[in-house]
Amino acid sequence: MIYFSLIIEFFKIGLFSFGGGYATIPFLYHISNTYGWYTVNELRHMIAVASVTPGPVGINVATYAGLKSAGLLGAMCATIFEMLPSFILVIITSKILKKFNDNFYVKATLSTLRPISCALLASVAIGLFKPILGDIKAIILLAILLILSWKSKKDPLFYMLIGGVVGVIMRIFF
Amino acid sequence: MKQVSLFKLFFLFAKFGAIALGGGFVILPIIKRELVDKRNLISNNDLMDYFALSQSLPGIIAANISLFTGYKLRGILGALVAMFGVVFVPFWAIVIIATFLSSISGNSYVQGIFWGVGVAVIALIILTARDIWRNAKRNLFFYIIFLLALVSLLILNFSPIKTIITLVIVGVLYKRFEYVRREGK
């Protein structure tokens, strides 16, 4: 039963991803490798669409991944169950509020999570990079995008726009 | 502080979700303008607390802020209404766009766009990782946990969750040990 696995996986994402929308991508990448509900290439497209659609990226990409995996009902399961841990945790922490962030264990956990998130994203970047390894044009485009924005990260729209325009130009001329 | 109806709450958050392109850092000023400045429903201090807490909790930051705010205004029902409100427009937007995209995905130019934005996504993720790296206080602890996480993910092929649980336990135990030793002196 795909809905059951979907609910469990997206609940886990909601419970274990720290640091915003892009922090959910390592989990979505892991799902693609474990269940094969969508391919790594499809995941790249889903992230692109989620980044330029209104709404929080993390929720958009969950909706899209759920939709790809199991249709409209899948999209609903993924979206709702990704937020369920937040719902429970917010109601619990609302009672203790400020004390929560001052707690020793909360602080220790958060300072450990920072290098872990960094490594998670790095490993996903490597995973997403593998399928384009033989595509020299893609590697050149990636290098140009990185050089253009190395000093400061720009709006996600900036990357999608350049990527999209270059993609169309490639189709016309090459 | 005024009382707000659940119906109104849903529409307010549906609006926030519809105009927030990005995530938590984008939705914060939108909520502030509407609920703090314009409607005086919550105080700025409360909202800032919610924002700080939302970043410490797991999950989507924008959803966390909405849940805190909804809970503050109307209790558990308010939290639920705010949560469903904030995802309402993005949910249907994704469903419609995805359906539309799959019907035109055979087109050569659309495939070109997909190719290009697929590459752009990799750049975006590398830069997100670099931002965390730059903004973090990088001491020996940071480097060791970072390396252990990479080994766990890339060499041992552990899942993200297994990696997180294992290393958080290691990290917290180490911090506790360090704290006890320092206090003991």
Image: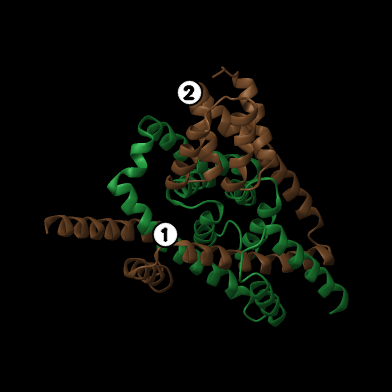
Establish if B180 lies above or below B3. below
Disc 1 sits on a residue from what chain?
A: A
- Do the residues bearing badges 1 and 2 touch, measured as CB atoms within 8 Å? no
Disc 2 sits on a residue from what chain?
A: B
At 49% across and 66% down in the image, what residue appears? B134
* Quadrant location, the C terminus of chain A: bottom right
Instruction: From the image, tell me which residue sits under label 1.
Output: A114
Tell me, yes or no, if residue B159 can be seen here.
no
Q: Is residue B148 left or right of residue A138?
A: left
Can you tell which mark lies on residue B75?
2
* Colour representing chain A: green
Query: Hey, what amino acid is under mark 1?
Result: Arg
Establish if A100 lies above or below A65. above
Q: Is residue A170 left or right of residue B185?
A: right
Q: Residues within 10 Å of mark 2 (few under 14, many from 20)?
A: some
At 22% across and 55% down in the image, what residue appears? B176
Picture coordinates of residue A173, whole percent (x, y): 87, 78
Q: Is residue A98 left or right of residue A10?
A: left
Nearer the observer, A26 or A19: A19
Nearer the observer, A101 or B19: A101
Tell me, yes or no, if residue B30 can be seen here.
yes
- At mark 1, the secondary structure is helix
The chain that appears brown in the image is B
Can you tell which mark lies on residue B118?
none
Query: Hey, what amino acid is under mark 2?
Result: Gly
Nearer the observer, A172 or A34: A172
Picture coordinates of residue A97, whole percent (x, y): 38, 35
Are the numbered discs 1 and 2 placed on the same chain, yes or no?
no
